[in-house]
Amino acid sequence: MMTLGIIGTGMIGGSIGIRARELGWRVLGFDANPEAALEARVRGAIEEVAMREEIDERADVIVIAAHIAGTIAEIERLRFTQPRKARLIIDISSVKAPVVEAARGLTNFVATHPMAGRERSGPSAAARDVFEGKTWLYIPTGDRELDWRAVEFIGAFGAIPVEADAIEHDRIVAVTSHLPQVLATLFAARLSRPEVQIDAFMGPTAKELLRLSRSSMEMWRDILNANRENIGVELRALAHDLQEAAAALESERLPVAF
């Protein structure tokens, strides 16, 4: 029986645990918040609450399912402890270049990023089908056998493994993921004015932006700090496009995109 150790039992970690248990794996879980680990066990996402040291000792595969700062801290810890059994160690964080740099010297580590998530967080948001049919990016190590272990792991969760370069990954997700989150958060802030009740006036696009704005701000502050340069470039480019669109409308023309 394969033993999976999950460090971080929130939505992503918990979802990995639920699916792994369906596959017949033994699942150990640790969380810096002990209540989250206990909730994950009650909800069936993990079989056993464990300490980090137990995961290091017993797990065949280790998943670091923490925010970026926590992920890098765990990687630095594992570089010194070098888990005894683990043939594969992965992370799931949204920014890859700093993770790859931190992991130099950590045996059997592959940086990954499942392009799946929800606006809700914590073990209560975990579900077995979160990764089904979704892209799960991974950064090749150059060790074909190790990379194949990562690909097999990703496939076991119903996801589609896609190879990516760490620097290119961070540049692209700044546009496809991080920029939309900033827009959603700013849009929600504009709608928080108490003088008007606007729920009845919102269409699907506005509702989707509000849904995104409910994502964990603790997680997103970590992401914005880790990928600030790429996100800043995209925000300035979009701001330029918005200024041009406003100027076109004020001149009784349509914006170029229309």
Image (tube, grey):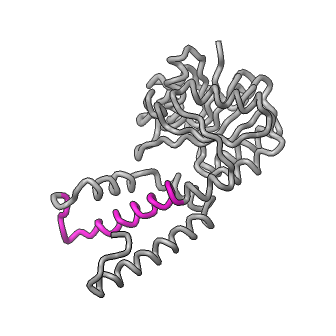
Predominant secondary structure, magenta span: helix
- Compared across the picture, whether 227 is left or right of 256 comes to right
As for residue 71 lying within the magenta part, the answer is no
Q: Position of residue 258 (x, y in %)?
A: 33, 69
As for residue 177 lying within the magenta part, the answer is yes
Q: Position of residue 151 (x, y in %)?
A: 64, 30
Does the image show residue 32?
no
Total numbered labels: 0
Q: Position of residue 26 (x, y in %)?
A: 60, 17
Q: Position of residue 255 (x, y in %)?
A: 34, 76
Q: Residue at x 50, y 55 (%)?
A: 176
The quadrant of the picture occupied by the N terminus is top right
Does the image show residue 84?
yes
- Compared across the picture, whether 1 is left or right of 46 comes to right
- Compared across the picture, whether 90 is left or right of 173 comes to right
- The boundaries of the magenta stretch are 175-199
Q: Residue at x 74, y 36 (%)?
A: 109
- 240 to 137, vertically: above or below: below
Q: Quadrant of residue 186?
A: bottom left
Q: Nearer the viewer, residue 187 or 49?
A: 187
The single residue placed furthest to the left in the displayed view is: 200
- 9 to 226, vertically: above or below: above
The single residue placed furthest to the top in the displayed view is: 1
Q: Residue at x 29, y 66 (%)?
A: 192
